[in-house]
Image (tube, grey):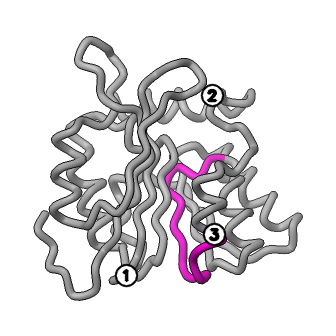
Amino acid sequence: MERFSRWIRFNSWYFMRPPWDTGITPPELEDFILTHTSGKALDLGCGTGTNILRLAHAGWDVTGVDFALRAVNKARTRLRQAGLAGKVMAADVTRLDDVTGGFDLILDIGCLHGLDSGDRQAYYDHILRLLADGGTYLLYAHLHNHGSEDLGIAQAEIGWLAKALTLARREDSSDRWGRAATWLWFERQPGKENDG
């Protein structure tokens, strides 16, 4: 029932413009695009497709996933209108069994921090399965605040991910509403065993 009510809530946001759908590719992703050779990218929680469009323009083979059907339809329309190839799927990021791996970039800007603790292990299992050797998992998330209802990502989770992958870079900041947030660049070293 909770999953269904979350689905209704996210779909209803897209009758308007959700506050997280800025229509602007963040500088962290722009920098990544400028410093990496194009490859295969997966955007988890792609919304209306701003970042998959930017990646596709830069020559990336893109796949977007979002929970909200209205967002998925808008992203598909935007790709088509721009004359760009790409795949956009309506799916739950904790249920990606039909997605095949080998992604050079897995991007998550604000999706993980909305998942409850019961869904996170399935999400992480998919990240570890889908990320290619040498690939980057680029994550933007709110930081968990113990006195807040905002789920965020806890320091223990960051530590766990840093064991399974390599934490190459971290930049802490705050979002436009003053909530503590972080950008994390995880890399899968070629030949590194999954310690997760």
* Left or right of residue 36: residue 83: right
* Left or right of residue 75: residue 93: left
Type of amino acid under label 1? Gly
Decide: marks 1, 3 in contact (CB < 8 A)? no
Alpha-carbon span between mark 2 and mark 3: 32 Å
Number of residues whose C-alpha sits closer than 10 Å to that of mark 2, classed few (under 14), some (14–19) or many (20 or more): some
What secondary structure is marked by label 1? strand
Considering only order in the chain, which callout, 1 or 2, is on the residue closer to the N terminus?
A: 2
Residue under numbered circle 2: 12
Q: Which residues are magenta?
A: 33-47
Considering only order in the chain, which callout, 3 or 1, is on the residue closer to the N terminus?
A: 3
* Left or right of residue 162: residue 105: right
What residue appears at the point 20 percent right and 51 percent down from the top-left corner? 121
Toward the left, the furthest residue is: 195
Q: Is residue 42 magenta?
A: yes
Is residue 1 among the parts visible in the rendering? Answer: no
Quadrant including the C terminus: bottom left
Type of amino acid under label 2? Ser
Is residue 152 among the parts visible in the rendering? Answer: yes
Number of residues whose C-alpha sits closer than 10 Å to that of mark 3, classed few (under 14), some (14–19) or many (20 or more): some
